[in-house]
Structures are given as structure tokens and as C-alpha cells.
Image (cartoon, helix red, strand yellow):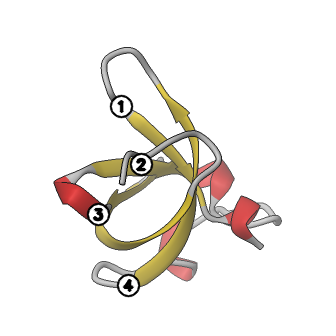
Amino acid sequence: MDLAVGAIVEGKVTGITKFGAFVALPEGKSGMVHISEVANTYVSDIHDHLTEGQDVKVKVIGIDPAGKISLSIKRTQ
């Protein structure tokens, strides 16, 4: 399955930073959910919403020419 913009897939949070969370996707790919794409409300501490190892549903919102995948959790709801 090729990931395409608009696709909704299941993933697992593999790392959390102050600006977002990294998510492991199918086929060994990974992407990042920017902190602004975690919830529909203001997120000051991402740890209030996500933990490492958590399974999440994400929407692919962008794939840049270098192959970096941008994801959103809030757009799946």
C-alpha cells in the first residue's frame, strides 16, 4: 500500500519532542505529527495527549519531495 495524501492509517508513536511526535507507519515508513495537528484545542504539552508506544490513527497531510511525511491526528476525528 503506497501512502498518499489523504490516506488514514494506523501507526505507533515512537518518539515525542517539544514540537511534535514521530509515528511508525506501515511498510517501515515513519512520519511526524506537528504539535498543532495533535488536537483541535491548543496543546501546550504534547505529553498530555500522547505517550510513546501509543497506537494512533493518523491522516497523511503532506509528503515533501524528500519523502518526509506530515501527519495529523486531529483531522481523523
Q: CA distance from mark 1 to mark 4?
A: 21 Å
Label placed on residue 45: none
Is residue 16 something that shows in the picture?
A: no
Secondary structure type for disc 4: loop
Label placed on residue 54: 4
Q: Earlier in the sequence, mark 2 or mark 1?
A: 2
Residue type highlighted by circle 4: Gln
User: Residue visible at 29% across and 51% down?
Assistant: 30
Quarter where residue 73 is shown:
bottom right
Q: Are marks 2 and 1 in contact (CB under 8 Å)?
A: yes
User: Residue visible at 51% across and 41% down?
Assistant: 4
Q: Which residue is mark 2?
A: 32
Name the quadrant of the N terminus. Answer: bottom left
Q: Foreground residue, 51 or 64? A: 64
Residues packed near mark 4 inside 10 Å, few (<14), some (14 to 19) or many (20 plus):
few
Q: Earlier in the sequence, mark 4 or mark 2?
A: 2
Nearer the observer: mark 2 or 1; the answer is 1
User: In this rendering, would 11 be left or right of 59?
Assistant: left
Label placed on residue 26: 3
Q: Foreground residue, 42 or 22? A: 22
Residue type highlighted by circle 2: Met
